[in-house]
Image: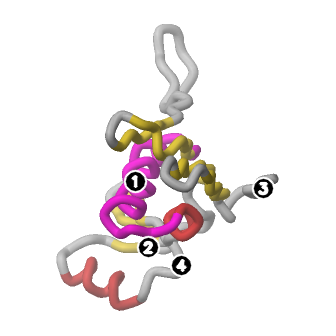
Amino acid sequence: NVAPRKRPLHTIIPGMCLRDGKVVYCYGVMGGGYQPVGHTHLLTNLIDFSMDPQEAMDSPRVFHVEGRLDVERGLDDNVMAGLEALGHKVGRPEMPWGGGQLIEIDWDNGTLAGASDPRKDGCAIGY
């Protein structure tokens, strides 16, 4: 609800990730309350799972909404069954969560790699 002295649910939160003092990722994820989760999901895919930028962006998402976990299509049904076995209420979202773009800077090779979320309009183009 709109009212005096209230703050928006989200703000624009672009991100940068550094390695050895140098920026290696510039990124942003949109989606209201999903934004902080989306940033974490993206970085986890890049750093912990060693995905390339587009693979990390494309990866199916899980988001907590109103007491349930919404699991995007593309995540194996066994994962959903496992979450339910742990006591979670699980569902499929009607619409995909968020959207985002990312640029990876490879300082050793002097290259940039871009990724654009297929959930929204956009593309990564270089020259």
* Mark nearer the viewer, 2 or 4: 4
In the figure, 33 relative to 89: above or below? above
Residue at the right extreme?
127
Instruction: Give how far apart the Cα atoms at labels 3 and 2 are.
Output: 35 Å
Q: Main secondary structure of the magenta part?
A: helix
Is residue 5 in the magenta section?
Answer: no
Instruction: Give how far apart the Cα atoms at labels 3 and 1 are.
Output: 21 Å
Is residue 43 in the magenta section?
Answer: yes
Q: Which residue corresponds to the image point at 37% horizontal and 65% vertical from the top-left?
A: 69
Q: Which residue is mark 3?
A: 125
Residue 100 visible in the current orientation:
no
Whole-percent x, y for residue 120 in the image:
71, 57
What amino acid is at disc 4? Arg
Whole-percent x, y for residue 25 in the image:
49, 45
Name the residue nearer the viewer: 80 or 127.
127
Q: Which residue is mark 2?
A: 91
Q: Which residue is mark 1?
A: 43
Span colored in magenta: 30-52
Reading the chain from its start, which is encountered first: label 3 or label 1?
Answer: 1
Reading the chain from its start, which is encountered first: label 2 or label 4?
Answer: 4
Instruction: Give how far apart the Cα atoms at labels 2 and 1 are.
Output: 24 Å
Numbered disc 1: secondary structure: helix
In the figure, 52 relative to 2: above or below? below
